[in-house]
Image (tube, grey):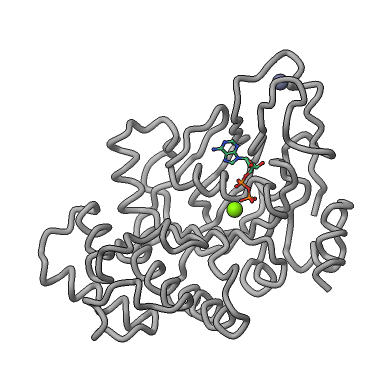
Amino acid sequence: MAVLQDGRNDIEQQTDGQPWVLKADRLTKRYGSGCSYCSVLIDPDHGNRCPVCGTVIACADVSFTLGRGEVLGIVGESGSGKSTLMQIMNLSLPVDEGELLFQEMDSQGHASAGPVNLLTLDKYARRVFRNERLGIVYQRPELGLNMNFTVGGNVAEKLLLANWRNVGRIRERTSELMRLTELSPERIDDDPKKFSGGMLQRVQIAKALSSSPVVLLLDEVTTGLDLSVQARVLDLIKQLRWELHMTMLLVSHDLGVIKQLAERTIVMKNGRVVESGLTDQILEDPQHPYTQLLVSSAL
Ligand SMILES: Nc1ncnc2c1ncn2[C@@H]1O[C@H](COP(=O)(O)OP(=O)(O)O)[C@@H](O)[C@H]1O
Ligand SMILES: [Mg+2]
Ligand SMILES: [Zn+2]
């Protein structure tokens, strides 16, 4: 494990021998116009905002590699840039700098074409990629679900965008996913409003998985749930991991959640990666003072 040196880290090289699926290179997103003081006055040790022009560095120089079938954890306190990063990964937020390379693979897991920088795709291609290859689950179900559609309607929404046309097959797929996520398929025509918090996360997961995405993005999916409900949702994610060999980016402010699922982790503070490496090593021997603080407060 190496502590970050100017935005680069050893995590880029380590995917445990698996071929990589996504490679993020120096992703940077700023909110604000920027000024000549920005680069000197924004001190990541003290904040992410320029005191002169108010520009916020939501994330800066974030680089990592995601191996096929890997779960990579992203941890950091509130405001550290985790959701910004997830929106970039979901191709729903334009970046100021950086690349996001995607490696297409055949069923054998071999690279089937050269990598594509997803951030250069046009709007249409981006939408197709998002609907077919990505699935995202949010902390707040109303971000991931249309609360005025039924469960079936929500899953159908994603599948229709991923070019599924046969209504019977869409319903069949939805029932299959409901079983997988331990929801009763009899509730396919129920409104999400009738579901509990834990069940809503299952519905979001079912929707996210519907198009058999290559990468699942999970943004604080258990935050705010009761502990017992949280444990069940985490068990479901573990099960998906083993049964579907899902590749996942798992964001949480909670090291306990990261510890259960992610073999490697990156630690973010004020939009920057301050430490990265094997999760167990980070937990046992945190190098950066910020990580030490996170680890000691999680004990
Ligand atoms: N639309 C926006 N306009 C201005 N600042 C934003 C916007 N979205 C996020 N930010 C700022 O970017 C930083 C990172 O936010 P976020 O990615 O949501 O962090 P996290 O998910 O780790 O809590 C925060 O300081 C936040 O206030
Ligand atoms: Mg967030
Ligand atoms: Zn400035």
Q: Determine which quarter of the picture holds residue 97.
A: top right
Above or below: residue 80 compared with residue 179: above
Q: Indicate whether 203 appears above or below 289.
A: below
Tell me what residue is drawn at x 60 percent, y 20 percent. Answer: 33
Q: What's the residue at 66%, 32% (across, down)?
A: 56
Give x and y (percent) for residue 279.
73, 65
Q: Quadrant of residue 204?
A: bottom left
Q: Quadrant of the C terminus?
A: bottom right
Residue 206 percent across, percent down from the top left = 36, 70
Instruction: Check the image and name the residue furthest to the top.
Output: 36
Residue closer to the observer: 44 or 110: 44
Tell me if residue 108 comes above or below residue 197 in the rendering.
above
Quadrant containing ligand 3 = top right
Q: Residue at x 55, y 63 (%)?
A: 70
- Picture coordinates of residue 298, whole percent (x, y): 80, 69
Q: Position of residue 66 (x, y in %)?
A: 56, 53
Viewed as shown, does residue 77 lie left or right of 204? right
Quick one: 288 or 32, which is closer to the camera? 32
Judge whether 36 appears above or below 205 on screen. above
Residue at 32% from the left image edge and 83% from the top image edge: 179
Residue 51 appears left or right of 96:
right
In front of the other: 240 or 208: 208
